[in-house]
Image: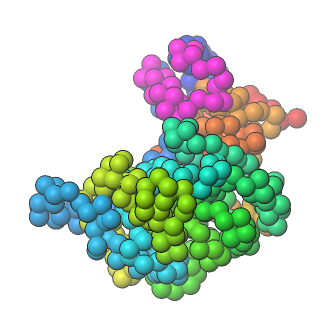
Amino acid sequence: MSNTPIDPVIAEEVISQFNIPSFGKATIREVVAIASEIEKKTGEEFIHMEMGVPGLKPAQIGVDAEIAALRNGVAAIYPIIDGLPELKKETSRFIKAFIDINISPECCVPVVGSMQGTFASFLTCGQCEKGKDTILFIDPGFPVQKQQITVLGLKYESFDVYDFRGAKLEAKLESFLAKGNIAAIIYSNPNNPSWICLNEEELAIIGKLSNKYDTIILEDLAYFGMDFRKDFGTPFQPPYIPTVARYTENYALLISGSKAFSYAGQRIAVVAMSDKLYNREYPGLTEKYGNGAYGRVFIHRVLYAISSGTCHSAQYALAAMFKGASDGAFNFVEEVKEYGKRAKQLKEIFCNNGFYIVYDKDLGEDIADGFYFTIGYPGMTGGELMKELIYYGVSAISLETTGSNQKGLRACTSFIKDHQYDLLNERMQQFRIYHPID
Ligand SMILES: Cc1ncc(COP(=O)(O)O)c(C=O)c1O
């Protein structure tokens, strides 16, 4: 009998089959494959916290609208590449309702998920001006976006924001921007993986420097409204979702259907560019495409070349979800608060058993309970902890893959099932016994 919930011989055998040189750098897919293989071989259930996949049902309002659109025959017709007029109008209204920012419908463009939105944005930003060929990541971040940079042949720079919160952010950002090569800055807010949220003071700094150095800000709102410390679910009423758009006009917001509406499978998001950015002519774009207006190039050159538009029926779905939310008929924030409830319980279990939250504060305030959280264990690196937890039937990814300098793991709440809290508690009590903290 082994002392761990998972037979270490089997776990070791499976891990070694994957030939991963540094376990801390294992990708999400590799961790899923390892955990699933061990589950199959041992018959022991894993507590899966590695995948950032929505664990809730898709918003019904979207499903209904999409089915109706398909019944009306939209599948036969190419969607207009600029986007369905109804979706463009409802995006503009949704942004006004929940962020309190004015963006014209023309500048709101559907994309095949935020993934396509960032890909197309990196590409466009990287071509605006000669010498500005680098994207700056305020990390930790979503690893696939760096892969996009590599695929595109662009360059990136990054830093872990952990030690540069609040006023300290300004000098740090400026140390990169002063070199003159930064085409755009990207961050997610709330942040994947740490769930920190940049506050108004920090967004004001980013906006100010964007103006000073003429750099485009890509604000990735994949977890739109999901900082549950405040109730962002009521349309046209404060509190409004914090945004850099209050501090600069050099921005594009990426709003995804995947998490806030549990609509990841249909691959739908919008890129909402400020009116100023949309219409702005850049020398690099004019040279390459003739017409150098950012928005036109983004749609008619870049998106056209990549996918010729976005799935027609999914646009109807997103339009209906935005409309329902802005009408006050559908409180999307309430629907996803479940993740916050799960995070609260999971964090308690880990913290009661010797773990700590790595990214624990937004300046003075505790971070929100939400889709992700980060955990560390005294004396262990992220890679060591990730491997050790495998023997206890818990899978998560190391922060090493996210551009973080901290030692720990990202845990995602989305796959947790009700019966797994007790199981996790039992396993973590055992973990603690075998990993005494001095
Ligand atoms: C920060 C961030 N951006 C973008 C995405 C991808 O969104 P989409 O499903 O719309 O492509 C994710 C998904 O996990 C994410 O965490």
Residue sitting at x 55%, y 32%: 27
Left or right: residue 327 compared with residue 118:
left
Q: Position of residue 43 (x, y in %)?
A: 44, 24
Q: Residue furthest right?
A: 438
Left or right: residue 354 compared with residue 58:
right
State whether the magenta stretch is mostly helix, strand or loop: helix
Q: Is residue 337 visible?
A: no
Closest to the observer, 382 or 313 = 313
Relative to residue 66, is residue 193 depicted above or below?
above
Closest to the observer, 27 or 130 = 130
Relative to residue 414, is residue 72 depicted above or below?
below
Quadrant of the image for the N terminus? top right
Say whether residue 17 is magenta: yes
Number of disc labels: 0
Say whether residue 143 is magenta: no
Q: Which residues are magenta?
A: 16-41
Q: Position of residue 234 (x, y in %)?
A: 47, 81
Q: Position of residue 141 (x, y in %)?
A: 62, 48
Q: Residue furthest bottom?
A: 237
Residue sitting at x 38%, y 76%: 105
Residue sitting at x 83%, y 61%: 171
Residue sitting at x 28%, y 73%: 85
